[in-house]
Amino acid sequence: MATHMPPSLLAVLRRLAPGTELRNGIERIIQHGSGALVVLGGGAAVEDLCTGGFLLRDTRFSEQRLAELAKMDGAIVLDDGAERILRANVHLIPDASIATNETGTRHRTAERMAIQTGKPLVSVSEGRKIAVVFTAEGRQELESPVTVLPRANQMVQNLDRSRRRLDLAEELLTRQELEGNATFRSAASIIQRSEIIHRLGSEVDDLTVALGDEGTLIRFQAADLLQGVDELSRLVITDYAAPRRRNRTLDDLSDLSMGEVHDPELVAAVFGFKDLDVIANPKGYRVLGGVPGLPASVKDGLVSHFKNLSRMMAASAERLARVEGVGRSRAQQLRSYFEQLQQDAGLLLQNHRG
């Protein structure tokens, strides 16, 4: 869906979030001006590539111990939970034939070790005073929250603008559906904007990992802007997609680049939409989704009985009541809801023309 950070890398960055003891230890190493190689996990695969140094027994991890041990030249090996220090002053000897684009000795060793053992490593550069995390799936520099926060705030602003555009696109689709002139292009627009929001949300999520506790407010803001997007796209797909593609989701757009997501023809093809400007006959699930407390079985019954939204909206309360599970009371509720929708759509149209 989005160009999301590899899961293994994201998991390690969460363990190294600002404020954690492990991150504090790395920060101490940088402040001391010494470089370091820290292996985040032990086991046979790591032991086979270690030589020299010394073993530590029952040595609890602490940020102070990590920083002091880093003053020696060799690598430090922690257990998988970073609760114990297993080895220190170790020379690592990964397979030199493993390809790497890194230039520094520590970074090259770290990348090869991560690929060969599957364990993440943190490489602290003595000269540049930066720390880089390596996993088998990629690398990421540990950034200061002060550096990341402005980017995260800007991304939330982009997310907010995209959500407002999605809400306007949904209003347009509703008006067109009630007027009987909805097109596949309008449906594709909803799906496109939903996917863009998801990709932006993934980027915000990645950035907040680097913020630690300082990213809490931004996470809440992003979650609020993402609320309902999945359900909206699902209902639009169900209403408009070709029969054999109604179970598809935004995940089916994951192979498209962001540029391709902006192409309505490419998005339409994924869901089997017809000519984008052909008048469509939506099933009505999205509109029915706005009826409070309406069971899924009743929605299915209404769609099955009336076949499309236009017929459903035109039905009298008596006809609606004939559908299994509806009854007189619910039929009146539906009729009132449909009439209110039509009135609201009329007001929107007047305001638009005005």
Image (cartoon, grey):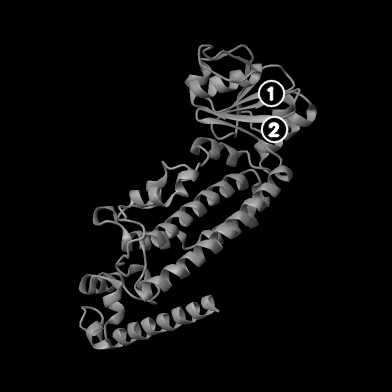
- Element at badge 1? strand
Residue 197 versus residue 94: which sits nearer the camera? 197
Count of marks, rendered view: 2
Mark sitting earlier along the chain (1/2):
2
Instruction: Identify the mark at residue 301; answer none if there is no mark.
Output: none
| Residue 56 visible in rendering | no
Seen in the image, is 38 located left or right of residue 320? right
Seen in the image, is 171 located left or right of residue 293? right
**Pointer 2 residue:** 26
Q: CA distance from mark 1 to mark 2?
A: 9 Å
Instruction: State the image coordinates of residue 94 (x, y, percent, origin top left).
Output: 54, 15
CB contact under 8 Å: marks 1 and 2: yes
- Element at badge 2? helix
Q: Toward which corner of the image does residue 286 lie, by quadrant?
A: bottom left
Residue at figure coordinates x 70%, y 44% from the top left: 145
Instruction: State the image coordinates of residue 163 (x, y, percent, origin top left).
Output: 54, 61
Instruction: State the image coordinates of residue 323 (x, y, percent, origin top left).
Output: 21, 79
Instruction: State the image coordinates of residue 111 (x, y, percent, origin top left).
Output: 56, 22
**Pointer 1 residue:** 36
Residue 349 versus residue 289: which sits nearer the camera? 349
Tell me the quarter of the image containing the C terminus. Answer: bottom right
Is disc 1 surrounded by few (<14), some (14 to 19) or many (20+) residues within 10 Å? many
Seen in the image, is 88 located left or right of residue 186? right
Q: Vertical placement of 7 versus 157: above or below?
A: above
Residue 241 versus residue 138: which sits nearer the camera? 241
